Amino acid sequence: MPTLTAPADAKVQLTEANKAFIKRANKLLIDGQWVPSASGKTFPTYNPATGEVITRCAEGDKEDINRAVAAARQAFEKGPWKDLTASERGRIVWKIGDLMLEHADELAELEAYDNGKTRGVARYVDVPLSADAFHYMAGWATKICGQTFPISVPYMPGSKFHAMSLREPVGVVGQIIPWNFPLLMAAWKLAPALAAGCTVVLKPAEQTPLTALRLGELMIEAGVPPGVVNIVTGYGETAGASLAAHDDVDKVAFTGSTEVGKLIVQAAAGNLKKVSLELGGKSPNVIFKDTADLETAINGAANAVFFNHGQCCVAGTRLFAEKAVFDQVVDGIASRAKKIKLGFGLDEDTQMGPLVSEEQLARVTGYLEAGKRDGAEFVTGGVRHGDRGYFVEPTIITNTKPHMSVVQEEIFGPVLVAEPFSDEEDLIRRANDTTYGLAAAVWTKDTARAHRIAKAYRAGTVWVNCYNVFDSALPFGGYKQSGWGREMSGEALALYTESKAVIVAL
Ligand code: NAI
Ligand code: MG
């Protein structure tokens, strides 16, 4: 049984900077000003380790979205942003990354407090990766280029042209982000949009609004002009839905559930705005008995599913281990799972925090109950931990059938489904037997097999002998119902630019 440090006794000791910030985190950022919501309404954000309210944030709704979109439109069409050189724009984007690193400890503390993740993960994964997204994209600002084309125009013999394409910012962008990596998802969305010269209305997740608001302050400090980035906190069904449907938004970028992704597509149909989506996953992680070092693969498999409490779109939640090593692999992951120390994310020795919300606790424990009803076997975990906060024990499930919901659906908690396999071809079929296609992994020292399987996977990212390796330079996104488009890397610029063909008669 994992040990639980009692969150009830956890003393919330925040830095003075964060105590002061939390007091002013009740406004929206519209046109460079911090303003209350039009309705005056607020909503609570909670410490998921205790269920206590941290503070109340401004509850933005349709009217606030209208104002934010108008400010973004104005900033896109007039004013300093449009007239900056690419180099000047790039320097502002770079400065945001610098300021994030300068305030890394503070941002990590805020993220861990609001989301429940451990301070260490926030400090050494979320914050540096977020800053790197801005630093990486800053370099792209000066490298967004069109092309020239040697055109022939067969029906105009003898005519001469100079033909080229221009890459222009797509315009006003609506960005709707989730709560599992709140700051990082804001960075993945904002950095390429700003590098491309777009203006933005960002809608953070209602569960975790704090770090996006703090980032808003840092962006102003970095020199982002008024109206270029607007931040409207509030609920998905109201503020989010208004943004997705808004007729004056040129593009919407969304990360979250596949269910809401489909609603975004419908909402976008009104003015046929561009849409990019990063949705759920149910990623296969395959261990062959010929893997170079079984202990490394076992550690990798535990990390694949338990990192960030399983609240990862790429979580390796479907483990396939070759029959000869299946028991050893499952025992190895189970013994690691049992030792994981659950607790308040801000406590030093905590290794896994709570799920983000009461709703997610209910969702995850609902899947665990369904798995039990369906007759699956629970090797370890399977229940809520404690009676305060939203903790779930790291769980391993075996003896499943393909139709079970624990096998088919994204659970988004620390829950692994493990199955043995013996035949490679059959394994590939089973690994790909999902509506999702976000990530996949394989552990083997047979190079040809590694390449064969990497090609056979229908997924946007494949890890070989590793897991959860991310970098700003890598394209990230999904096959099938895991999404549309690729974020990060040079490919992300395609999401935030339009291509214009220009033909000049000579
Ligand atoms: P969600 O998809 O409802 O929330 C994501 C974002 O969309 C939030 O900002 C939310 O306010 C907004 N939103 C919700 N409804 C909307 C609507 N009708 N129009 C516009 N925006 C809307 O995700 P939720 O309910 O928080 O989590 C449910 C499940 O979604 C999780 O259990 C997990 O399976 C999946 N999920 C996947 C994520 C990923 O990284 N791909 C991240 C978060 C959740
Ligand atoms: Mg929801």
Image: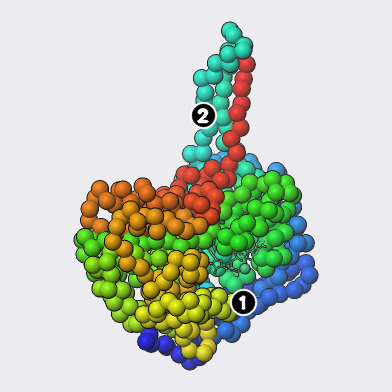
Across and down, in percent, residue 387 comes to 52, 90
Residue at image location 58% in from the left, 71% down from the top: 208
The answer to whether residue 446 is visible is: yes
The mark tally for this picture is: 2
Question: Which structural element holds mark 1?
Answer: strand
- Which sits in the foreground, 142 or 210? 210
Circle 2 packing at 10 Å, graded few (<14), some (14-19), many (20+), is: few
Name the one closer to the observer, 496 or 316.
Answer: 316
Residue sitting farthest toward the bottom:
9
* Kind of residue at badge 2: Gln
196 to the left or right of 298: right
Residue on which disc 2 sits: 147
Where residue 213 appears, x then y in whole percent? 60, 66
Q: What x and y, as percent, mark residue 115?
A: 52, 74
Which quarter of the figure has residue 207?
bottom right
Sequence order check: which comes first, mark 1 or mark 2? Answer: 1
7 lies above or below 223: below
Q: Within 10 Å of the Cα at label 1, are there few (<14), some (14-19), or many (20+) other Cα atoms?
A: many
Residue at 61% in and 76% down: 45
* Any part of residue 102 in sight: no
Residue at 74% across / 68% down in the picture?
37
Tell whether 402 sits left or right of 74. left
Question: As drawn, which residue projects farthest toward the top?
Answer: 158
Query: Disc 2 on helix, strand or loop?
Result: loop
* Quarter placement of the C terminus: top right
Picture quarter with ligand 1 = bottom right
Q: Which quadrant: the N terminus?
A: bottom left
Residue 450 position, x and y percent, is 29, 52
Image quadrant in which you'd find residue 32: bottom right
The circle drawn on residue 45 is 1
